[in-house]
Amino acid sequence: KAGVTQTPRYLIKTRGQQVTLSCSPISGHRSVSWYQQTPGQGLQFLFEYFSETQRNKGNFPGRFSGRQFSNSRSEMNVSTLELGDSALYLCASSLAGTAVDTIYFGEGSWLTVV
Amino acid sequence: TQLLEQSPQFLSIQEGENLTVYCNSSSVFSSLQWYRQEPGEGPVLLVTVVTGGEVKKLKRLTFQFGDARKDSSLHITAAQTGDTGLYLCAGDRGAGNNRKLIWGLGTSLAVNP
């Protein structure tokens, strides 16, 4: 079956702009989580969506937001981009996001802010 | 403050050598997962360990969960170039059926031919 698909794979934005990243989970998966990965901080949890509702949230400023659609596809948005937002943004899906579910990651979206 | 410390941060070895990487914490985890991430891709789950003292083997990879469920190790026997990648551990601090993963920074492994 198709894996987790993230678009776009690479993008360059300037400071102050906003960006929207998209994630299509594995068919049947209802939980979608977003992570930011940087060399210095590793994987940092942004938020998790389940059945169109944000179920968990990490410690990121309000500039980072997300949503999930009825078909479980998810988007995340970063407004007023800062240089420090340059990172690999990973989307992960699982059946229901419980402790026993396996998480499947997409290949990520590489964001560079200049 | 990094709740999960992975060591070493970088490791470069020759094909055929053995190696061990570590994942340590002062916190207790209900379970711990190991992932491998190759360049340009997302992490892929290798194993989940749940019980203190548990040992799991996956071909040439041996995973161990500490008795107190605070630390874990990954041992690779006769490393191959295909083992190259970033090895990440993630501990679950959630309660019941709710997952709350804490991630280490990873060990970057290079296996040279």
Image (cartoon, rainbow, N blue to C red):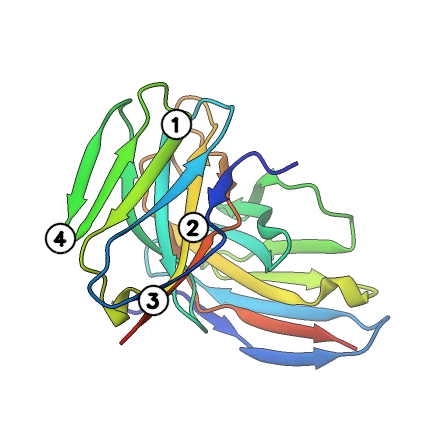
Q: Inspect the image, locate mark 1, and give the three-letter code of the amino acid beneath it.
A: Asn
Q: Chain of mark 1?
A: B
* Quadrant housing residue B51: top left
Indicate which label's residue lies in the foreground, 3 or 1: 3
Rendered-image quadrant of the N terminus of chain A = bottom left
Earlier residue among tags 3 and 1: 3
Q: Which residue is mark 1?
A: B97
Which label sits on residue B84?
Answer: 3
Q: Which residue is mark 2?
A: B88
Earlier residue among tags 4 and 3: 4
CA distance for labels 4 and 1: 30 Å
Indicate which label's residue lies in the foreground, 4 or 1: 4
* Quadrant housing residue B39: bottom left
Q: Inspect the image, locate mark 4, and give the three-letter code of the amino acid beneath it.
A: Lys
The lab-note entry on whether marks 3 and 1 share a chain reads yes
Q: Chain of mark 3?
A: B
The lab-note entry on whether marks 3 and 2 share a chain reads yes
Q: Chain of mark 4?
A: B
Earlier residue among tags 4 and 1: 4
Q: What SS does tag 1 mark? A: loop
Q: Disc 2, disc 1: CB below 8 Å?
A: no
The lab-note entry on whether marks 4 and 3 share a chain reads yes
